[in-house]
Amino acid sequence: MLNKRQRIQLWIASTLTALVGIVNLLSAVTPNLPRRTEILKEFIPFEIRVSSHFLAAITGFILLTLAANLLRRKRVAWLLTVGLLILSITLHLIKGLDYEESLVALVLLIELILIRRLFTAQSDRPSIAQGIRVLIGALLFTLAYGTVGFFLLDRQFSVEFNFIEALQQTLAMFFTLDNAGLQPTTRFGNFFANSIYFVAVTTFIYALFMLLRPVLLRTTLETERQQAIKIVEQHGKSSLARFTLFNDKAYYFSPSGKTVISYVSKGRGAVALGDPIGPDGDRRSAIQGFENFCDRNDWYPSFYQTLPDDLELYKSLGFKVIQIGEEAVVDLKSFTLEGKAGKNLRTVVNRFTKLNYQVKFYQPPIADDLLQKLKVISDEWLKMMQGSEKRFSVGWFDENYLRGCEIVVVETAGGEITAFANIISEYQLNEITIDLMRRKTEVENGTMDFLFISMFKHFQERGYDSFNLGLSALAGVGENQKSPRLEKGLHYLYEHLNRFYNFKGLHEFKEKFHPRWEPRYLVYPTLSSLPDIVLALVRADSGDRLLDYFKSGT
């Protein structure tokens, strides 16, 4: 982690980079001083001098986009910035002997060279979101370039522009055939009017390249996923194992290549789903490697919904631990509807049996007509819950995913499907896990109970040891006096926010099946990193839906 002095140095370097970018823009649209121009005329042709104005504007745009990446310690951003600063120093001297601007760029260049060891972070994975941000930036930059230029260079044209008129003239350059009657009166004015198009084209080509990069690298990501599948199938043994293979995840592989950590990075948080998956003896190396990998990317590493098994290992490596809930696991070896404990469940089964309801199990691949029926139910359920699909630690309604799952449905006497669930394997653990569980708005009371009881009996007969019902968030957290303050704070939220999130309702539904409750944890590096990690977790859970909309269009 960086100390206070290093953080200040980064902020200064990032701020100065943005400042130099703005200086380049303003200098590009400002006429040269006459005395300096007279000196340059003898050595440098007019075409080269005005081209330097154009290039200064482009370097200004790129420096503005690099400023934020310098703050995140990106090594490639440092290299590009150093190169652009050297170019900027040269351009300022060529276009008008503007040694003042060159001096500012030189000061920043020296500063960056002195703190070069801070820039160790690798580049972000290319993303559609990154491309969209650059595209929007290109639009705004082109608009700013033209507006500022017309405002400052009004003597180069037949009309004097105020700020609003300068903005309108910039827009007219793109939306009118005659450029709103624009008439340059000098060679520099004519150059500037044409340069607006060059700036627009150059920045937009750069933005489109950023937008298309993720498409170009999909093959590489797919090879990583295939490697992850092999490891998970060989070593996976938790309710989260299948979810680590969903396409919202990236993968880190241990130095030996035998262990995989499935994670999502959002902002400065990198949240791994569950514990590392691989041989037990490789776990320490995997966690240390992931921590170093995150440090190189300026991310905070964390592990979400970890098992109790490796808590001491995490702590020995400097991590902190907080309980975030309990996972409900039904022991199928002892599950029964007999006796007093099973009376209520037995009543449900008897009532639905008399109504001629059935629970049917469909093996993959699932037919398209069944998937369409399930989609109608899923959409109705989402509307009823006034929510949208979650991600990261659960699945979502995706036909390709569900086609490969075992599907369980409740059918009425008339053959209508009223509820369904999909079943996933835990690979090396003789346990079955449920993912989606959805129903229609109007169903017979107790439908979901009937569905679950039928699944318990079915998988009990197939020889499974247990049935995992998933996490009950915040359940069992901070309930005793020795609990950490942070867990007690979460317990307060559990008690007082229930009316908004119905934490207790979900817990009570699972409790009726008499499961054993196993604690699950969030592992994180420092208390100060928690806000970034929680924000990353929220974004991963929601799937950044606005960005998914843009992705669907590519």
Image (cartoon, rainbow, N blue to C red):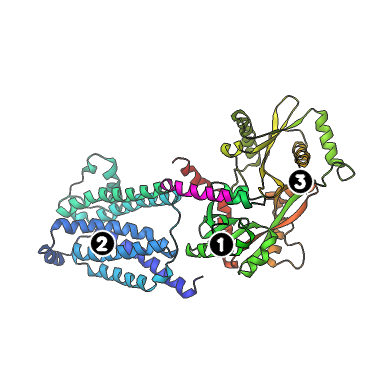
Relative placement, left or right, of 258 versus 118 is right
Decide which of tag 1 and tag 3 comes sooner along the chain. 1
Q: On screen, 168 above or below 525?
A: above
Q: Position of residue 395 (x, y in %)?
A: 61, 44
Horizontal and vertical percent position of residue 303? 61, 59
- Which residue position holds label 1? 301
Q: Is residue 320 left or right of residue 1?
A: right
Q: Secondary structure at mark 3?
A: helix
Asked whether the residues under the numbered discs 1 and 2 touch, taking CB atoms below 8 Å apart as contact, a structural biologist would say no
Query: What is the distance, in whole Å, between disc 2 and disc 3 at their CAs?
Result: 67 Å
Q: Which residues are magenta?
A: 214-230
388 vs 393, nearest the viewer: 393
Name the residue furthest right: 339
What's the residue at 21%, 66% (across, down)?
93
Q: Quadrant of residue 374?
A: top right
Q: Which mark is residue 27?
A: 2
Instruction: Tell me which secondary structure the magenta stretch mostly adopts.
Output: helix
Disc 1 marks a residue whose amino acid type is Pro
Q: Earlier in the sequence, mark 2 or mark 3?
A: 2
Mark 1 or mark 2, whichever is nearer to me: 1
Looking at this view, is 8 or 339 the one in front? 339
Upstream in sequence: badge 1 or badge 2: 2
Residue 417 in view (yes/no)? yes
Q: Which mark is residue 509?
A: 3
